[in-house]
Image (tube, rainbow, N blue to C red):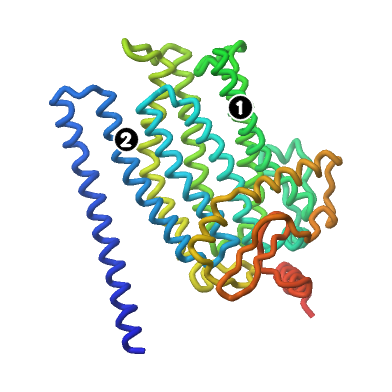
Amino acid sequence: MEELSVLALAHERAARLSRILTVIGYGLIVTALPFVVYVLVERGASKQVVAWVVAGVCVMLAVSLSIHDINANLDNFERPELQKYVVRILFMIPIYSITSWLALYDEKLNVLLDSIRGLYEAFVIWSFTYFLMVYLGPTQEMLAERLSLKPQEEHLFPFNYILRPWQMGYEFLFKCKFGTLQYVIWKILNELMVLIATALGVYGYGTWSLTAVYFYCMMITNFSQLLAIYCLALFYHATYKDLAPIHPLAKFICIKAVIFFSFWQETFLSMLVFFGWIKSTPYFSASEYAEALQDFIICIEMFIFSIAHHYYFSYRDFEGNAGDSPSSTGSGRAPYGRALLESAFPNDLVYDITRDMRRLSRGGSFSASTYENTASPGPSLAGRSGQLFNESNHERYLVEDQEQLSRLMDQAKAQAHPGNVL
């Protein structure tokens, strides 16, 4: 026991020393960056080279920190049903950083890389929505039951004057969920339209004209994104007390900041191009200059956001009982390789899209039968405890049998109305 205590103490001190050295290293790099820029300018380096070097340093710092956080979550995969969404969210920083840096190096790749960024952005919003939902209930059936026991949630201002309240339970759950899922569907269609319109020469980036495809894509994307964020905010407003242990507001702000900064920066820069405030140079057109400026800013911002993600999407949220949800059944740590596969493959998203599109094609249904606990295809993941992560709907949860599910639903009712417990 004493040897174990000594080893644990040594490991803790080594980890603390590693964190201190990392902070010092980052500080030295950031401090030295202005000096590097000065040397490059003095030696006659072009603005493009200077911008690429500065962006590259920020990308290196952001990606290294994010990879550390991703690896820490995979190595401590205590709550697979939750942490797979955290890993997906953390991957947003490397994807945004690397695609923006490569686009800054070669503007010909900008359309393709921007499409990759846009698709992953939608995937992150969907993943965060499901992170919150999975935390509240091991099945959507249980979550709908939990929501049905809550007071009626009114729409947020100003929509409370024009929309009727969504009935708490299955209707509220489905509409909040599909409100974020529609953004994923639209982004897939949007990026296909962008690629085709660019190939045909009719996209017109930065052209606020009714004859340019860009204008329509930008307007619809703006509406779709706002709807997704609104549905996510409405769901949070209805469940924020239950979600308090995982600090959802800070996580929500981190994701919202990345998405809104990138989108509104692009919109603002395109307006500057349209009104002639960004002008062409001997080497770049005004639109190409605006795209390069957007990519450069994203590279800088991702370093800042990676620090925020490091604190608010930490694996420590799931150590021991720290990440236990109101309906948690506990789980064992998953092997690293399987944890990576569990997080990497979006088969749950594909299943979710096909299932909800079928539901919509039938006119929509907000009853228990639409959320029945049926298994979906896909691999299962076994934890250290030997329990099986059964796929209920599209998710994988530790629900061993119907009796356990009933106990959890009874627990949800008791928590919602403690005074009614016999």
Q: Which residue was labeled with disc 2?
A: 55
Left or right: where 369 falls relative to 74? right
Q: Residue at x 82, y 53 (%)?
A: 370
Give the image location of residue 232, x and y in percent: 63, 46
Q: Label 2 near label 1: C-beta < 8 Å?
A: no
Q: Residues within 10 Å of mark 2 (few under 14, many from 20)?
A: many
Q: Relative to the observer, which residue lies in front, 235 or 390? A: 390
Relative to 104, is 284 above or below? above
Please tell me in which quadrant of the rendered image residue 35 appears: top left
Q: Relative to the observer, which residue lies in front, 155 or 268? A: 268
Q: Which residue was labeled with disc 1?
A: 192
Q: Secondary structure at mark 1?
A: helix
Give the image location of residue 170, x and y in percent: 79, 53
Left or right: where 228 falls relative to 118? right
Label ID, residue 351:
none
Give the image location of residue 86, x and y in percent: 52, 55
Left or right: where 183 falls relative to 265? right
Q: Nearer the viewer, mark 1 or mark 2?
A: 1
Q: CA distance from mark 1 to mark 2?
A: 28 Å
User: Can see residue 327?
Assistant: no
Q: Amino acid at mark 1?
A: Leu
Q: Residue at x 35, y 41 (%)?
A: 59
Q: Residue at x 33, y 13 (%)?
A: 283
